[in-house]
Image: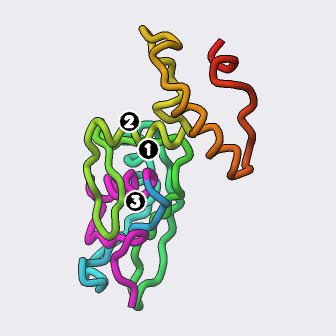
Amino acid sequence: MIKENQYTEFKPKFNEDVVETLVAFANAKGGKVLVGVDDSGKPVKNFTIGNESLQNWVNDIKNKTQPQIIPDVDEIDYQGTKVVEFRIQEYPVKPVSCRGKYYKRVKNSNHLLSVTEIADVYMQSMQYSWDAYTAKGYSYSDLDEKKIQKFTDKVNSVGRFSLEGTPKECYA
């Protein structure tokens, strides 16, 4: 039997919680939401899927997310009952929001991100870091050459790439 985890969530019906969960998955490593399944993993009695339900739900997800996400969706057989499976991959440029709120999947729950976490998720997805920005108002004399050389030696010893030149030459 399937259980809720970092990549799987159950929802008894389609609502805003489904959209928030898909956003949380998009901001993490991806995942799937089974709609028509209760928290214990059992199909919901009398769950029905209308002729236009899937398309309407996908449109709702698209309209409530920024940047817009469009999950893969299928009607599947789950324990002898028809349910809906939404699948979303990790979004390449994060974070994705749902009505201006940002969520990330951690273990088996969705966490609302703080402003700092939103900035961190964005920086990571763009492969930026704090050291990619120029610190205005400082000069070379404010730097510690010994610490810079120690860092350079450490980077060069790993061998992934090489930092050439003295700190003063690189600063100029």
Q: Which image quadrant is residue 33 in?
A: bottom left
Instruction: Identify residue for label 1.
Output: 62
- Residue at 56% x, 31% y is 148
Please name the amino acid that badge 1 sits on.
Lys
Instruction: Identify residue for label 3.
Output: 53
Q: Residue 58, position in %: x, y?
A: 44, 52
Residues rendered magenta in the picture: 1-27
Q: Residue 74, position in %: x, y?
A: 51, 68
Q: Residue 61, position in %: x, y?
A: 40, 48
From this view, report whether residue 153 is shown above or below residue 132. Answer: below
Query: Could you tell me which quadrant the C terminus lies in?
Result: top right
Q: For numbered disc 3, what is the local secondary structure?
A: helix
Q: Residue 171, position in %: x, y?
A: 62, 16
Q: Which image quadrant is residue 161 in?
A: top right
- Residue at 34% x, 68% y is 107
Please name the amino acid that badge 2 sits on.
Ala
Residue depth check, mark 1 versus mark 3: number of the one nearer the observer:
1
Would you say 24 lies left or right of 131 here? left
Query: Could you tell me which quadrant the N terminus lies in?
Result: bottom left
Would you say 134 lies left or right of 66 here? right
Q: Is residue 14 magenta?
A: yes
Q: Which of disc 2 and disc 3 is earlier in sequence?
A: 3
Q: Which of disc 3 and disc 1 is earlier in sequence?
A: 3
Instruction: Identify residue for label 2.
Output: 119
